[in-house]
Image (spheres, rainbow, N blue to C red):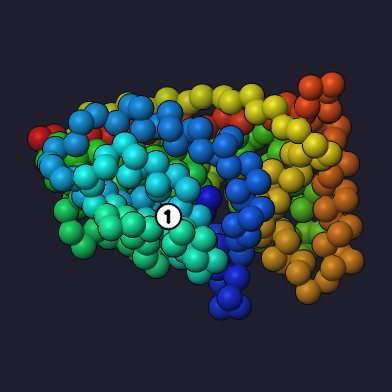
């Protein structure tokens, strides 16, 4: 998802680029594919420095992957942070004696206590300035603690490029030009490596392209309805006719870019991973 400064649909004033409304049910329609990168990220996290460990999930969304943290570290005290009331309501079903959820805003969140692991799954792309927040988050780690995150690294893929192209066309530019996430919402892998290494961390950065085979009719559109298309749906929410026209035009572009096959529709999806361990 999901970031701590996104996913609220309660009517408050918001910058659409970073604060789209979120639909947990739509987001979870592709839960298995969205959760796999988180599992791959955790596989590279080293042993945590304290027992029991203190862990925060930054941008926890509906809480399904936060629960994976409790399985991996059953003695840990874990808090999932998010800014979406709907996502937090969904996440509450996963709460337990050592797992809770709280409202927070990732754009200005700083650790109020010492953590052994700060983890974030597909959230930082929604947070302008997140690169500069990393130093403060590392300050909140215990010696030997780890910051681990993954973000989509495919702003140049048709999924996003076609949305920007359509949104920037003559018909839509005045209404949508300011709401679409920019190509530089995620930095190059080397930028994260350099920043984290200069902050004194043993750092591992890599990218992986997943080939998701999606079933059903227009599954790529269904996928992006849960994430990148949210700002557009919000911006056109008061004009259903225009909203449906944009979605139909975008659907047609996606059908051409991601053709259906006899076994499903292949969505290549590149993600960037970073695991940074503080000197201990």
State the image quarter where residue 244 is shown: bottom right
Where residue 227 appears, x then y in whole percent?
63, 50
Residue pointed to by mark 1: 94
Identity of the residue drawn at 77% across and 52% down: 168
x then y, percent, for residue 154: 60, 34
Q: From the viewer's perspective, is residue 26 above or below residue 20?
A: above
Q: Quadrant of residue 196?
A: top left
Which residue is rendered at x = 50% and y = 66% of the image? 89
Q: Residue at x 57, y 29 (%)?
A: 270
Q: Is residue 185 above or below residue 197?
A: below
**Residue 118 pos. (x, y %):** 29, 46
Q: Please give left or right for residue 59 compared with residue 27 in the image.
A: left
> In the image, 236: left or right of 63?
right
Work out whether residue 55 or residue 74 is closer to the camera in this orientation and state it.
Answer: 74
For disc 1, the neighbor class at 10 Å (few under 14, some 14 to 19, many from 20) is some
Name of the residue lying farthest toward the top: 262
Q: In terms of secondary structure, where does tag 1 sit?
A: helix
Q: Nearer the viewer, residue 71 or 147?
A: 71
Residue drawn at (51%, 38%) of the image: 35
Residue 55, visible in the rendered structure: yes
Q: Between residues 278 and 87, which one lies in front from this camera angle?
A: 87
Percent of width and height locating residue 280: 10, 35
Q: Nearer the viewer, residue 130 or 78?
A: 78
Residue 130 in view here: no
Number of callouts in the render? 1
Left or right: where 212 falls relative to 195: right
């Amino acid at each position: 998802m999901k970031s701590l400064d996104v996913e609220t649909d309660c009517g408050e004033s918001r910058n659409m680029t970073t604060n789209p409304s979120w639909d947990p049910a739509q987001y979870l329609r592709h839960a298995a594919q969205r959760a796999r990168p988180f599992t791959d990220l955790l596989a590279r996290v080293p042993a945590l420095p304290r027992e029991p460990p203190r862990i925060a999930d930054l941008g926890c969304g509906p809480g399904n992957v936060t629960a994976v943290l409790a399985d991996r570290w059953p003695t840990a005290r874990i808090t999932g942070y998010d800014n979406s009331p709907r996502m937090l309501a969904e996440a509450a079903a996963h709460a337990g004696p050592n797992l809770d959820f709280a409202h927070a805003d990732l754009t200005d969140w700083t650790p109020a206590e010492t953590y052994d692991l700060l983890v974030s799954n597909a959230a930082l792309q929604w947070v302008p300035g997140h690169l500069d927040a990393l130093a403060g988050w590392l300050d909140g780690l215990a010696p030997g603690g780890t910051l681990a995150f993954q973000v989509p690294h495919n702003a140049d893929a048709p999924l996003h490029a076609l949305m920007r192209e359509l949104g920037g066309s003559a018909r839509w530019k005045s209404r949508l030009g300011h709401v679409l996430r920019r190509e530089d919402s995620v930095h190059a892998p080397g930028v994260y490596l350099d920043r984290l290494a200069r902050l004194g961390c043993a750092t591992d950065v890599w990218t992986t392209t997943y080939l998701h085979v999606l079933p059903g009719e227009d599954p790529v559109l269904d996928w992006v309805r849960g994430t990148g298309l949210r700002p557009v749906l919000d911006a056109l929410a008061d004009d259903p006719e225009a909203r449906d026209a944009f979605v139909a035009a975008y659907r047609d572009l996606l059908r051409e870019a991601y053709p259906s096959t006899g076994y499903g529709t292949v969505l290549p999806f590149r993600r960037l991973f970073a695991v940074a361990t503080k000197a201990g």
